[in-house]
């Protein structure tokens, strides 16, 4: 098993009378991409702020290697906060060197890394531009570079994809994957399930401050991502519901989605469909992480530890 870089144990946090974190525990391992997923207000940012020492938990602990709380060497951690914003009248290079200086990172090395990353993020030649002349997405790229300029061992990204266009999202996604491949441990939060689905190794799903799922992405998919069959054609809902292995049918206009049991053998199931069905189009897919989340967040009885031995 990979080494643990960060451990979060039994975090509890209340604001006035509202308990927003209820016994949150997970870890982040060397070189992995770990995602905290959950809907708005679930407690993702509060968890991250407690890890970063921006606020302190009422109960529980945060450990980075063998260091706790104030002993944690913050210069080994990179952080992209949810709040975006940089000093407006400062030049791009100056702000990046300032970020590096805060972490005691050598200036010349930082300068070279900054230039390399500006090029990578399609911002070549912008080093002397004032931040106020950048677009929102460009500013976010600068802030992202600022969070990795000092080669952190652990990188914490709070909603890294929000506000980015699809091309920039792809650039960020690839860079995050590359960093992990080179050994950086990544913890990122998101409420956009589909974006992180194919990039994270493990996930922690949180809803109303509580753990809903914690485990390997592959295990979560195996456990929850059953097959669904989408049929376009004129069919009675009751006919479709009476087919074997169908747990639920959703219908709108001529599109019917048949959710199938975990045990279904797809080829066998397809071969026994009645000839009387009206099929103009048919596809079989696994339900997405997004659908799994909506299901689970609205029916807590499904919540259980997934792949606990691997988690
Ligand atoms: N400083 C604060 N004072 C009072 N309540 C707070 C504070 N910070 C967060 N909360 C509350 O804690 C809950 C969790 O908020 P948090 O920002 O952690 O959610 P989130 O999962 O990051 O959501 P989002 O996806 O919307 O960013 C919310 O109900 C929020 O209103």
Image (cartoon, rainbow, N blue to C red):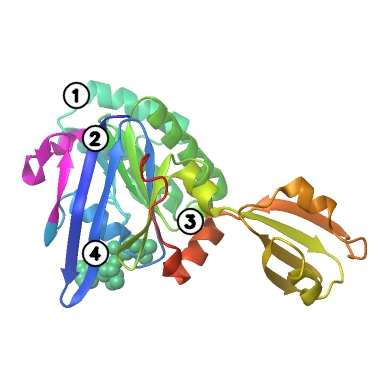
Q: Position of residue 143 (x, y in %)?
A: 33, 44
Q: CA distance from mark 2 to mark 4?
A: 22 Å
Image quadrant where one finds the N terminus: top left
Q: For the residues marked 2 and 1, what is the alpha-carbon distance in whole angstroms?
A: 24 Å
Q: Is residue 208 above or below residue 155?
A: below
Q: Position of residue 140 (x, y in %)?
A: 39, 48
Which mark identifies residue 106? 1
Which residue is disc 3 drawn over?
192
Mark 3 residue crowding within 10 angstroms, few (<14) / some (14–19) / many (20+): some
Please state which of the two labelled residues, at mark 2 or mark 1, is closer to the viewer: 2
Helix, strand or loop for disc 3 = loop
Of the numbered discs 3 and 1, the one sitting upstream in the chain is 1
**Vertical relation: 199 (above or below) 235:** above
The mark closer to the camera, 1 or 4, is: 4
Residue 115: percent from left, percent from top: 37, 27
Q: Which one is earlier in the sequence, the residue at label 2 or at label 4? A: 2
Q: Tell which of 196 and 170 is nearer to you.
A: 196
- Residue 210 in the magenta stretch? The answer is no
Q: Using the image as rendered, state which of residue 46 and residue 136 is in the foreground.
A: 46
State the extent of the magenta-drawn residues as a range. Answer: 60-76
Q: Residues within 10 Å of mark 2 (few under 14, many from 20)?
A: many
Report ligand 1 position as a quadrant.
bottom left
Label 4 sits on residue: 22
Q: Which mark is residue 237?
A: none
């Amino acid at each position: 098993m990979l080494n643990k870089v960060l451990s979060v144990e039994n975090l509890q946090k209340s604001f006035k009378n509202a308990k927003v974190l209820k016994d949150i525990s997970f870890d982040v391992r060397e070189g992995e991409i770990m995602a905290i997923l959950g809907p708005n207000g679930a407690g993702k940012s509060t968890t991250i702020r407690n890890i970063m020492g921006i606020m302190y938990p009422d109960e529980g602990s945060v450990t980075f290697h063998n260091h706790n709380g104030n002993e944690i060497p913050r210069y080994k951690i990179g952080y992209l906060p949810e709040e975006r914003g940089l000093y407006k009248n400062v030049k791009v290079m100056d702000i990046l060197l300032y970020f590096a200086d805060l972490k005691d990172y050598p200036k010349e090395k930082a300068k070279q890394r900054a230039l390399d990353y500006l090029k990578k993020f399609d911002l070549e030649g912008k080093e002397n531009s004032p931040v106020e002349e950048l677009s929102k997405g460009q500013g976010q790229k600068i802030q992202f570079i600022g969070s990795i300029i000092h080669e952190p061992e652990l990188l914490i990204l709070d909603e890294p994809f929000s506000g980015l266009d699809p091309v920039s999202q792809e650039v960020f996604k690839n860079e995050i994957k590359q960093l992990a491949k080179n050994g950086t441990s990544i913890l990122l939060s998101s409420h956009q399930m589909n974006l992180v689905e194919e990039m994270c190794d493990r996930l922690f799903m949180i809803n109303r401050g509580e753990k809903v799922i914690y485990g390997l992405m592959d295990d979560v998919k195996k456990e929850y991502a059953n097959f669904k069959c989408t049929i376009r054609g004129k069919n009675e809902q009751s006919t479709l519901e009476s087919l074997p292995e169908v747990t639920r049918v959703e219908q709108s206009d001529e599109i019917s989605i048949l959710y199938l049991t975990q045990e279904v053998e797809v080829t066998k199931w397809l071969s026994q469909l009645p000839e009387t069905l009206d099929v103009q189009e048919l596809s079989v897919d696994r339900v997405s992480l997004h659908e799994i989340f909506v299901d689970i967040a609205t029916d807590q009885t499904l919540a259980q530890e997934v792949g606990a031995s691997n988690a």
